[in-house]
């Protein structure tokens, strides 16, 4: 089940690559984990429309949080980020 959920996070990341209208992404409790967070962080580097991202309850660990932090050095659009457990 967790593997399927992580793959879902990867699918969401791919959708963000081509979407230029989505402003809020709410993925609470989908357990995307570090792999999903890394995939989302790669998209955050180039996405200019998402202003709010909720990844709470997704088992994002240190590696995933680090990847998102690095992406935010380049992304100046995101205003709200939730990584709560």
Image (cartoon, rainbow, N blue to C red):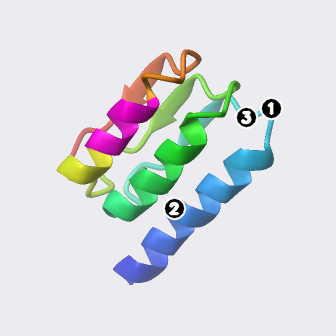
> Magenta residues, as a range?
66-71
Callout 1: few (<14), some (14-19), or many (20+) C-alpha neighbours within 10 Å? Answer: few
Residue 56 picture quarter? top left
Q: Reading the chain from its start, which is encountered first: label 1 or label 2? A: 2
Where's residue 22, x and y in %? 73, 34
Which label sits on residue 22? 3
Which label sits on residue 9? 2
Q: List the residue tagged with mark 1.
A: 21
Where's residue 13, x and y in %? 60, 54
Verify whether residue 68 appears in magenta.
yes
Taking depth in this image into account, of 11 and 47 the one nearest to the observer is 47
Where's residue 23, x and y in %? 67, 28
Where's residue 60, x and y in %? 28, 53
State the CA–CA distance, disc 3 to disc 2.
16 Å
State the CA–CA distance, disc 1 to disc 2.
19 Å
State the CA–CA distance, disc 1 to disc 3.
4 Å
Q: Main secondary structure of the magenta part?
A: helix
Q: Are marks 1 and 3 in contact (CB under 8 Å)?
A: yes
Callout 2: few (<14), some (14-19), or many (20+) C-alpha neighbours within 10 Å? Answer: many
Which label sits on residue 78? none
Residue at (51% x, 73% y) in the render:
7
Quarter of the picture holding the N terminus:
bottom left
């Amino acid at each position: 089940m967790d593997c399927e959920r992580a793959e879902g996070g990867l699918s969401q990341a791919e959708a963000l690559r081509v979407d230029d209208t989505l402003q809020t992404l709410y993925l609470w409790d989908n357990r995307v984990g570090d792999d999903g967070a890394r995939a989302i962080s790669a998209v955050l580097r180039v996405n200019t429309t998402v202003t709010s991202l909720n990844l709470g309850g997704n088992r994002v660990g240190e590696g995933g949080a680090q990847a998102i932090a690095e992406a935010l050095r380049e992304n100046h659009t995101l205003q709200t980020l939730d990584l709560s457990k």
